[in-house]
Image (tube, helix red, strand yellow):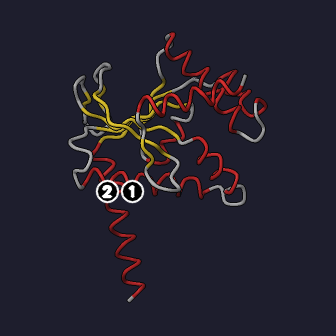
């Protein structure tokens, strides 16, 4: 039964043409034209139908590998996510992804995205959101070392949400960090 989730995940990555952000990254992404209702973010950015956005996805295999390796260092997962966002900020800042308005991810972990600078919004209760929840909880059971035991609390109470970040916020938070990190490395190498 769990192989259904693995097959579905492979199919969605192929169908949506998601791309990894780096060899060890935990995010994948795709560019798309937004078709939902207008969304206004806290920084004043409004995303309307027709705007180009970056749709973020977890690379679940890499996420699990990173989580297992991070048992003794729980902050390393956060560091890996920040590194991916720095890579994304670099691509956006250089214009390599065209004119994008914002980033969005749909996940059971949307609230945790606040630590990375995202705004979290619960999805409305719809048939589509119920299917997404079913899929996400199944993926959690497939990839987590404790399987369904770990997924149980999300099956009972978890609800997917959207994690949003404007283009400007991404660049403010992560483009400067990459430049600072690069300067610090080159100065220490001298």
Q: Position of residue 179 (x, y in %)?
A: 32, 67
Question: Horizontal placement of 50 versus 73: left or right?
Answer: left
Establish if 57 lies above or below 50: below
Say which residue appears at 61% left-offset and 44% top-offset.
Answer: 61
How many numbered marks does the figure carry?
2
Instruction: Check contact, mark 1 vs mark 2: CB within 8 A.
Output: yes
Q: Residue furthest bottom?
A: 190
Numbered label attached to residue 36: none
Q: Which residue is mark 2?
A: 90
Say which residue appears at 38% left-offset and 89% top-offset.
Answer: 190
Establish if 135 lies above or below 114: above
Task: Kindly report the distance in space between the C-alpha atoms of the residues bearing marks 1 and 2.
Answer: 6 Å
Q: Position of residue 121 (x, y in %)?
A: 45, 28
Query: Which of the image's four quarters has the N terminus?
Result: top right
> Which is more toward the observer, 32 or 124?
32
Say which residue appears at 48% left-offset and 34% top-offset.
Answer: 13
Label 2 secondary element = helix
Q: Quick one: label 2, few (<14), some, or many (20+) residues within 10 Å?
A: many
> Which is more toward the observer, 4 or 70?
4
Question: Horizontal placement of 77 versus 181: left or right?
Answer: right
Q: Position of residue 173 (x, y in %)?
A: 36, 54
Quarter assignment of residue 6: top right
Q: Which residue is mark 1?
A: 86
Quarter assignment of residue 164: top left
Q: Quick one: label 1, few (<14), some, or many (20+) residues within 10 Å?
A: many
Say which residue appears at 32% left-offset and 62% top-offset.
Answer: 176
Label 1 secondary element = helix
Quarter assignment of residue 158: top right
Question: Horizontal placement of 83 versus 171: left or right?
Answer: right
């Amino acid at each position: 039964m769990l192989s259904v989730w693995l097959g579905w995940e492979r199919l969605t990555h192929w169908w949506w043409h998601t791309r990894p952000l780096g060899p060890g990254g935990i995010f994948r992404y795709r560019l798309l034209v937004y078709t939902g209702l207008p969304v206004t973010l806290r920084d004043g950015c409004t995303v309307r139908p027709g705007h180009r956005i970056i749709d973020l996805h977890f690379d679940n295999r890499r996420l699990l590998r990173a989580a297992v390796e991070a048992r003794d260092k729980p902050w390393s997962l956060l560091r890996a996510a920040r590194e991916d966002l720095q890579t994304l900020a670099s691509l956006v800042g250089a214009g390599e992804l065209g004119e994008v308005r914002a980033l969005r991810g749909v996940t059971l972990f949307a609230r945790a995205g606040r630590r990375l600078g995202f705004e979290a919004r619960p999805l409305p209760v719809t048939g589509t959101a119920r299917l997404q929840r079913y899929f996400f909880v199944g993926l959690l059971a497939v990839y987590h070392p404790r399987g369904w035991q770990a997924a149980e609390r999300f099956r009972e109470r978890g609800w997917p949400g959207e994690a949003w970040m404007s283009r400007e916020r991404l660049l403010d938070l992560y483009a400067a960090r990459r430049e600072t990190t690069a300067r610090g490395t080159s100065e220490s190498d001298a």
